[in-house]
Structures are given as structure tokens and as C-alpha cells.
Image (cartoon, rainbow, N blue to C red):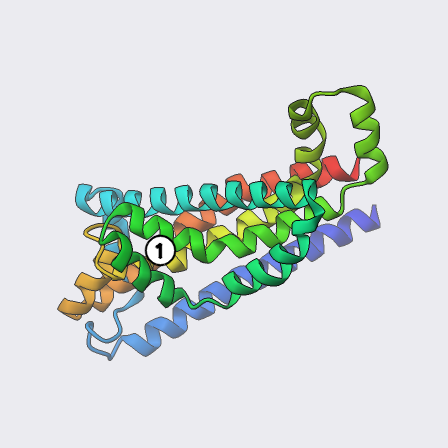
Amino acid sequence: MNKVMLTRTQGLIQRAITEGGVVLVLLGWWLFSKDMPAFIMPTPQAAFGKMLEFFYDPALMRHAAISFMRVGLAVILATVLALIIGLLTRAFPILEEAVERRLLTFFNSFPSVGWAILAVIWFRISDGTVIFIQVMIILPFCLINVLEGLRQLDPELVEMGRSLTRSRRRLFLRLVLPLTMPFLIAGLRVAYGIAWKVALVSELFGAPSGLGYLLMQAQVRADATLVFACCLVIVLIFGVMDHFVLRPLARRYSVQRAA
């Protein structure tokens, strides 16, 4: 009973600290901005009021939806590519050094702006250009987790699976994929967050739509309120997806792996 009460008390304290921190940040923001011009530092009321427009203004909703779809597609493509490369490395161990010491080194060190400039030169401005930039930048984060997940597979368990079925597809879907899912989800969560940062940079290079396009328009008009609103919308979208989709998936597959 005492342990239950202690756990509840700790939970309440943690929540109070978390929520109190948010309140303090908002209060500091308001105190700093109340005497500042709106084009330099808008008040929290103005920023949140502009953010709410994304829920009923069709034009703003369209830009947010386009960015969300680009990010989602880029994360899926990067995850699939990482899984394919990881499986090829596992099937052909001779590729391991080339992938880990050459391919990963290249992708991890290649500048993000370099991908953006090259993509615009190669493909001009399009949705495909924005998605290509995001995929190239987040691919190494997905690949590192996929390689680690495949490396942690129990050889005896895999061998037992091979003895039960000769179907590689069945072995992959029923054994390999579930066991690597915790690593895959971890990489996906990291990639999803980075993809939002990359999305704005890639859309700033001239995309005709999306939240990055809105930020470019806000810069031209010196509209700091719209800048804050776009950033808050991204935080909201990321938080909702992470809380209701990615975290439950991570908990589900971590429990399955532990079992």
C-alpha cells in the first residue's frame, strides 16, 4: 500500500514539475514579449491564436497537410530502404564493412544543405525533390537502428525458425521483423523528428506549398506571429503522432521482445 501511495505521489510531483515548467516558460514569454513589437516577438496569445487558424482556415490546413504527407512518406521510404540494405548486409556478410564503414560514414557526414542544393539542381522544385532531401538525410538514422536490430537476433532462434519453415517470407514476417521492430521503431521515432526539421529547410528552397513555404512568406512579410504559429503546429503534430502512434508501438514491441 505504501509503495502504491509513493508511486502515485512521485507521479503527481513529476506531472507538477512538467506542467509547472510549461507555465513558467509561457509566463516568461509573455513578460518578454508584452512590450516588444509584434513583428519581433509576438505574445503567446497572438501566436496561439494564429495557430488555431490552422484548424479552420482551408489554405493553412492544406499547407500543414502537405508537409505532414511529405514527412510521413519520407520516413516510410527511409525505413524501407534501411531495412532492405540491412537485410542485404545480413544475407551477404561481405557487404558489412562497405555499409558500416563507407556508406554510413558518407551519409552521416554529407551536409544537409548539400542534399538540398543537389536535389534542386537534379530534379528542380517539386514534391519529389522535398521528399528526396528528407530521405537522404534521415536514412542513416534508420539504417543504424536496423543494423543493430539485425545484429541482436539470436542465431539459435533464427535457426530454429528455419527448421520449422522453408519459406523465407514467412520466416521474415513471423520472426525476423517482430524481433527487429523495437530497433526499427526507435529509428523511426528519431527519423520522424528530424524529418520535420529537414522538411522546413527543404521547403524553404522554393517549394510552392507546405509549412516551409509559409515560413518563407512570413520572412518576406516580417510576420513573426506566423513563424511561431507554424513552429507550434509542428510541435503539436509531432506530439500527437508520437504520443498516440509511435510510443504505443514502441511499448508493444518492447514487451513482445521481452516476452
Q: Residue at x 19, y 77 (%)?
A: 37
Residue kind at label 1, given as amino acid type = Ala
- Is 92 left, or right, of 137 in this rendering? right
The answer to whether residue 46 is seen in the rendering is no
Relative vertical location of residue 46 with respect to residue 57 in this rendering, above or below: below
Task: Identify which residue, 168 or 246, lies in the foreground.
Answer: 168
Residue visible at 64% across and 39% down in the picture: 181
Q: In the displayed image of the protein, which residue is found farthest to the left? A: 221
Residue linked to disc 1: 199
Q: Nearer the viewer, residue 183 or 50?
A: 183
* Quadrant assignment for the C terminus: top right
How many numbered marks appear? 1
Which residue is found at the position 30% from the left and 42% from the top? 65
Rendered location of residue 185, percent (x, y): 59, 44
* Quadrant of res 17: bottom right
Q: Is residue 220 above or below residue 247?
A: below
Image height check: is 143 above or below 44?
above
Q: Quadrant of the N terminus?
A: top right
Whole-percent x and y of residue 99?
61, 55
Q: Nearer the viewer, residue 91 or 35?
A: 91
Neighbours of disc 1 within 10 Å: few (<14), some (14-19), many (20+): many
Element at label 1: helix
Q: Residue furthest front?
A: 94
Identify the residue at horizontal 43%, vertical 51% (top origin): 135
Residue 80: give x, y in percent of width and height.
52, 40
The reply to whether residue 142 is visible in this rendering is yes
Q: Is residue 132 left or right of residue 124?
A: right
* Residue 184: x %, y % from top left: 61, 44
Q: Is residue 147 left or right of residue 6?
A: left
